[in-house]
Image (cartoon, rainbow, N blue to C red):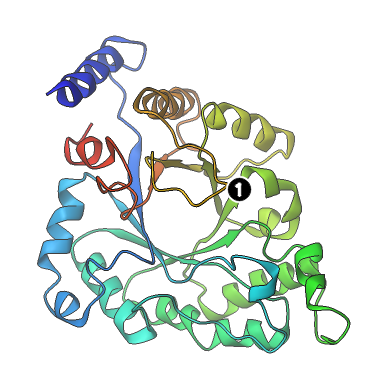
């Protein structure tokens, strides 16, 4: 009951503030690659439960995380090609995209590139990019960039890998290839705040950005950094509702109060920059579960 009271109070405070009379920011969610709900064949043949749950969460965008980041530099190989995580494959993802679009959701495919070689680029061209190309309605393509595709990370492959492309050149090739293969797609960049300056070609070539606002005060700090880059395209702040279950070495997640403060910060920015700040994304469908979050599911299903 305290959780429900908290969010009702937050809603009242927002409505009585300077945001009164304005529309709340749009909301999206990352469908985390490792969350099995909706991935098995039976669920995809009859996805009504998954679609109903998404509607109950008040989301308008669904970002399907097709693969994970490489955990360490040792995970990448010179001859690597794109590989789907968990139970995803091209056919299954295509069916889920179609079901989401038929239900009125806007869809983005989130891809974490691993190695800067032409072989890897070709595997994207003949794999996940075709899902977007073949969809009935436009599908966004979002590239998730952290340490991956930085020169230092790639050089861990050693001198034996003769086919490495400079990271910025690889990003420029990726942008051009994406536009050619799926011209209806808007190109997004998901990026950790730490690596914002490491992915200049994608930052320049993107139609929108989804910076990872995963710590208290991130929204304000990231906005300042984007202003320094003169970034004037749409910004979808990704905000984590995870509070527990982190891997060893990862910091604590946002508390309930910190999470509410970041959402309020997005609403404040949207009030001043309506066209550039359309809304926010929640990380993620797996992380809002009670195993990982004290409030995530309640927040989304409460439609606050």
- Residue 97 versus residue 152: which sits nearer the camera? 152
Q: Quadrant of residue 70?
A: bottom right
- Residue 84 versus residue 129: which sits nearer the camera? 84
Residue at mark 1: 192
On the rendered structure, is 144 left or right of 154?
left
Where 209 sits versus 26, above or below? below
Q: Residue at x 58, y 72 (%)?
A: 179
Q: How many marks?
A: 1
Look at the numbered disc 1 and give the secondary structure of its residue.
strand
On the rendered structure, is 304 left or right of 158?
left
Q: Residue lying furthest front in this view?
A: 248
Q: Quadrant of the N terminus?
A: top left
Q: Residue at x 59, y 65 (%)?
A: 71
Q: Residue at x 79, y 72 (%)?
A: 156
Q: Quadrant of the C terminus?
A: top left
On the rendered structure, is 102 left or right of 152?
left
> Whole-percent x and y of residue 273?
50, 29
> Whole-percent x and y of residue 112?
56, 67
Q: Residue at x 30, y 46 (%)?
A: 288
Q: Quadrant of residue 121?
A: bottom right
On the rendered structure, is 201 left or right of 246?
right
Other-residue count near label 1 (Cα within 10 Å), few / some / many at <14 / 14–19 / ≥20: some
Q: Residue lying furthest right in this view?
A: 159
> Whole-percent x and y of residue 236?
47, 44
Where 269 sits versus 73, above or below? above
> Whole-percent x and y of residue 127?
49, 85
- Residue 178 versus residue 71: which sits nearer the camera? 71
């Amino acid at each position: 009951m305290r959780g429900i009271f908290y969010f009702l109070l937050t809603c009242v405070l927002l409505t009585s503030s300077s945001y009164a009379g304005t529309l709340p920011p749009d909301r999206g969610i990352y469908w985390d690659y490792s969350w099995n709900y909706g991935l098995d064949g039976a669920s995809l043949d009859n996805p009504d439960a998954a679609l109903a749950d998404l509607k109950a969460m008040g989301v308008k965008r669904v970002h399907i995380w097709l693969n994970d980041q490489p955990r360490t530099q040792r995970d990448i190989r010179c001859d690597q090609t794109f590989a789907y995580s968990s139970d995803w494959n091209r056919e299954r993802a295509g069916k889920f995209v179609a079901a989401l679009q038929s239900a009125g959701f806007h869809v983005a495919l989130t891809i974490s590139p691993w190695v800067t070689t032409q072989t890897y680029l070709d595997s994207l061209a003949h794999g996940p990019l075709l899902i977007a190309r073949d969809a009935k309605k436009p599908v966004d393509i979002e590239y998730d960039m952290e340490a991956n595709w930085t020169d230092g990370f790639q050089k861990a492959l050693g001198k034996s890998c003769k086919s490495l492309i400079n990271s910025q050149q690889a990003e420029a090739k990726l942008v051009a290839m994406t536009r050619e293969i799926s011209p209806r797609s808007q190109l997004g960049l998901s990026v950790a705040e730490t690596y914002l300056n490491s992915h200049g070609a994608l930052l320049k070539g993107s139609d929108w950005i989804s910076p990872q606002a995963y710590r208290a005060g991130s929204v304000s700090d990231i906005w300042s950094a984007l202003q320094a880059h003169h970034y004037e395209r749409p910004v979808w702040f990704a905000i984590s509702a995870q509070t527990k279950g982190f891997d060893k070495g990862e910091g604590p997640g946002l508390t309930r109060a910190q999470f509410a403060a970041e959402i309020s910060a997005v609403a404040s920015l949207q009030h001043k920059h309506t066209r550039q700040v359309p809304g926010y994304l929640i990380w993620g469908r797996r992380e809002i579960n009670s195993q990982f979050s004290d409030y995530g599911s309640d927040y989304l299903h409460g439609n606050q």
